[in-house]
Structure formats: structure tokens, C-alpha cells
Image (cartoon, coloured by chain):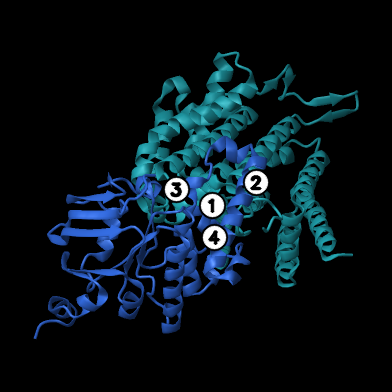
Chain colours: A blue, B cyan
Amino acid sequence: MTKGHDKVLAFRGVTKRFGGVVALDHFDMEVDEGQIVGLIGPNGSGKTTSFNVLTGIYAANGGEVEFLGQDITNWPAQKVYEAGVARTFQRSRLCVDLSIFDNIMIGNHQHLNHGLMFNIFKRKAFRRQMEESYEEAKELMTIFDPPLADRMFEAVGTFNMIDRRRIEICRALISHPRLLLLDEPSAGMTEDETRQLMDDILVARERIDGLSIVLVEHEMGMIERVTDRCVVLNFGQKICEGEYREVASDKLVQEAYLGVE
Amino acid sequence: MTDKSKDMLIGLTAIVLGSVFLITFIAIESQVGILALIGMTAIAVVVSARMGISKRISEAFSSNEALMNGTVIVALLVVTVWFREDHFPLLMIATVMLYLTACLGLNIQFGYTGVVNFSGAAFFGVGCYTAAVLNQHTAIPHLMVVVLGGVAAALVGSILILPVLRTRGHYAAVVTIAFGILFKTFLEVNDTLGGPQGLKVPGMEVLGWNFNSNIEIGDEIELSFYLNYVAIGLILSVLAFALTRRVERSWVGLSLDAVRLDETVAACFGINIRRWKITAFTLGNVLVGMAGAVFAMMLGFIAPTNFAFGDSLILVSIVLLGGMGSPWGTVVAAGLVILLPEKLQAIQEYRFLLYAIVVILILLFRPQGLLPRGLRAYVPGWRG
């Protein structure tokens, strides 16, 4: 890993079309190391699309995506993950029938030995790796939610929204990503839970050196408190960028959110 | 007595009762007797579930796994020895073992990975025909032929890999159904493979030991030759069971689950979806093909009608009935699905109707299967 990369992520003129709909229109955005960038905009403005293009779920129609100095445009999802990008999903997409530990280990894929021989015949070595991974997962879970760390072998389906969101964040962080993408983490949460979640995000940045975060969010209180900088999207175009206060007072942004008289 | 050893005692008692049930069920001839036995067992199962006994049994199995699994194998051996002189019961037991092996293969495919396969009978058939051809025309040792049956099924399966990777859900089901029908038609029109009349399959012989002649001990005792096939069926199914377990309790099993549950998430965390679908599909077909090869040698004769779509459905229904991804469920369901229609001979053609109704009722009231799969324990009894 090259050191001293100030710029972690850059979108340059990224365009994504779905038939006649332009979901992202020459979109530019940069994220610096250690920064938390808020990505906001009305529904359907292209926020999640930008995540999906970055993580290889959609192929871009134009432009380029650069991550840690590499051109990763249209890389398959697996490679993007291995390069150091991890994400959460809009509607929490955990495997509810699996345990917390299983879910976090899905995120840890990169560090686990998936050889058939290793898994089926070298059970002692497997067990060692499993126990090490368990300690690591437990440690990470303890940072966000100590009670959950003692319930690692219970099905995710039995936990509530905030717990699930934390499990999802742990699943993303266990791989030691350089960039964490959070897609509407506060969706479906009470005000109190949202507040706890904000603390979680700040804790994550504090604990993990050099972690950059992009946060898609509708909850403006959260954006205000957590982010260093905001990018505002409307109909796939960036209409404004800057600190929350500047952005919030921008005329175009107000029109986009409240409509024009 | 601690709770744990109490659980163990309950578990062991359950195994003993289970083998007594199995022996009575197989031995009983009168139809009224069978119906009464089924009714009593159903009540016993429901009552023990209500009283929490089944929970303790499963607790016993998870905390003393080696002991309990070993006892089950011993119990199966006892049942086998009980019927040592009777052809038909032993044939049924061996059939259950071989179907179990095949279904454990299918379980890896769609129970774990979500790769649907409605052409199980075709891959079973590939194993059968491989055994028929190799036993007739070559001198390859028969144990090797069994392995080659699995390899052949995997090779034939590789034709299907591209469509299986590109389709999902109903579409994948249709692709495999079409393949199964194609396979049967191919056998019917292909004269070198015997056409609709089928082929004779020379019986198994290992190191000069002929599987198809009765075992004579002294002048008095003559044991059924099917004992040989029960033995190899048991070995195969135990190996398949152990393999399934180890796959499940590893990162491989976790990746397979991730592929089944959410492909997008799996891809976003670096899981190579193609790799795991191909691995699971191939591994499953190997087991199905190996079971097929032994099955053909046991029956001594195979024809295309053995490998129809209906037979594929029976394999699928065993996995569904037992509970997707649950190897013990597959064991129970394989026994039920093979033995029940055989024991209901008296009601003639209606037995399949009754059998279908039983399957529908079970899936209606217990959609997760008879013995639903629990959470993964990487190392039994280990909880951090």
C-alpha cells in the first residue's frame, strides 16, 4: 500500500444511463484520506447508483473512477472489495438466517483460506484460523456494541435494526477497508437509534487510522454532525459541494429539496 | 446426573427406539399393522416434540457428536444384521443408503448453494450407465468404476455449467428439467447403450469377492448377497455425510450460503460466485454419479425408464422434505421416501397418491422440512 495518498477516491465525469434515464451525469467527487463525505440529494438523484458503479454492481457508461491512485472503473465487485472498498446496503442486507459471526466472516472473505483441501482436510489449521478470526470479530463488535459481542452465535434475524446496522458495519470493517460506503444507515431507525449510529460512525473513524467514509443519508442532523464535507446530487448531477453549512444555504440545494415556487 | 449426560441418555434411547421402529417397520407384513405403526410413530414424534424431548435429542447430537453418530451407524448395522438372510429388506436398506448419498450431493447443490438441479436422476443415470459400460467392456476394478461413475457425472454436468451460471430460480429449474428429459430421450434412441431395453450390469467384485453371490458360512448359514451392497452403500453415505458436514462447517460452506442468500452482497465481499457454483454443482454430481454406479451394479439391469423426470423429483423431494441444508433431515427423508411406498404395496397404484399427499402435508405444516437446519457450528460444541 502506497503511503501518503491524500486522495483516496475520485469520480471523474462518471455517467450511468438506464435506458433513457441518466442516473449519473458527468459526476465528479473526491474523497481525501480520513474524511467523512456526505452524499445527499432527493430520492432518485443517483446517490446509491454512484455506490453501485463504484463497487462494480453497475458498469459505468462513461468517465472514470480512481481509488488509491488506480483506475478501478468497471472492475468486478470482487476486485473492488479486494482493493479496499467495503459497503453497507440501503435496506440492511445481512443474511438473517446466519449467525452474527457468519455474517461478519462473509466480510472477512479476503483474509480467510478458501482452499477445498484446507477447509475439508486440514481441520486443525482451519480451527486455528477460525479462532483467530473469532477473536478479531469479537474485538471489533465490542467497539460498537459490547452486548452483541457475547451473542456472536445467534441468528441475525433475532436482532433489531440498530443491532443489525452495527453488525453490517462490522462486516464491512473486518476486512480493513480504506474506504467505507454507508448507504442510508439511519433508514428505519428511531431518533435515539440514529444518534447512537452517529456515535458509531465517529468511533469507527477515530479507531481506524486513515479510514475514509462516504455517507448517503437523508437525515440532515446526521450529515451536519458527522460529515466534513457534502456533495449534493440532483437528477444525477452534482449541484453543490462544500461544508454542510454552506451547502444548506445554497439556493440550488434548497430548490432541489423544496421545489421551485 | 448432569443435564448433559441426561440429554445423552435420551439421545441414545431415541436411537435404540428408532432402530426398533425401523426393524418392525421393515419386517411387518400386514397393512393394518403398518398403518397402526405409522400412526403411533407420528403421535410419538408429535408428543416428544411438545414435551421438548426432540430438543434434547438434538442437543445430545450436537454436544456428543462423535458418540451419537457412531451409535447411529452401529444401530444401522444391527438393523442390517437382523435382516441378514432376507433379500428384499436388505435391498431396500441399500437403496435408501444410495439415494441418501445422491441426495446429500443435491443438498450441497441447492441446499447450500441455491443451484437448483431437477435432473438428479440424469446424473444418477450417468453413473449407472458408466458402470454398465465399464463393467461389461473393461477390466477396471469395480471400486474404481464407482469413482469413475462420479467423474463421468461431473463431466456430463460440466455441459450444464454455463446455463446454470447464467440462469437463476425458475429459469435454472427449466434448464435442468430440459436436460433431464434430453438425457432420457438420448438413452432411448441410442442403440449402443441398449436403447429402451437398457443394459445388463455385471455385479460388483472387489479383490475377488463377488458381491452378487450369497455369503455362506459353514453349511448352515447363508446370508443374502445384498449385505455386500448395504455395506458399500453405508460406506458411501457415511463418507458423503462427513464430506457434507465438513463443507458446511468451513469457510467454503459459509461462502456457499452467501451465494445462495444474496449474490450481490457475496460479490461485494469478494466471494467468487462462479467458482462456488461450479464447485458445488460438480461436487454434488460426483456424489450422485457414485451412488448411481453402485445402484446399477446392485440391480444388475438398468433402462432409461429408471431415469425419468419423476425420479429427479423424488430426489428433490427428499432434500426438501428433510430440510434444505440439513444432512440429518436428508437421512430421515430418504428413509421415509424410499420405504413408505414400498411398505404400502397393498393399496397398489394408490400408494403414490398417498405418498404425494404425505409430502404435501408435511411441506404445508412444516415448510422448513422435517429436521430444519440449525445455525452453523464450525466446531461442534465450540462457542467461542
Which residue corresponds to mark 2?
A127
Indicate the quadrant containing the C terminus of chain A: top left, top right, bottom left or bottom right: bottom left
Q: Secondary structure at mark 2?
A: helix
Which residue corresponds to mark 1?
B317
The mark lying in front, picked from 4 and 3, is 4
Label number found at residue B116: 3
The mark lying in front, picked from 4 and 1, is 4
Q: Chain of mark 1?
A: B
Give amino acid for label 1.
Ser
Q: Chain of mark 4?
A: A
Q: Is residue A202 left or right of residue A230?
A: right
Which residue corresponds to mark 4?
A98
Gap in Å between the C-alphas at discs 4 and 3?
A: 21 Å
**Which residue appears at 55% of the width and 42% of the height?**
B105
Q: Secondary structure at mark 1?
A: helix
Q: Is residue B225 left or right of residue A106?
A: right
Neighbor class of circle 3 (other Cα within 10 Å; few <14, some 14-19, many 20+) is many
Give amino acid for label 4.
Leu
Pick whichever, B208 or B189, lies toward us.
B208
Percent of width and height locating residue B243: 62, 40
Percent of width and height locating residue A212: 36, 60
**Which residue appears at 65% of the width and 43% of the height?**
B241
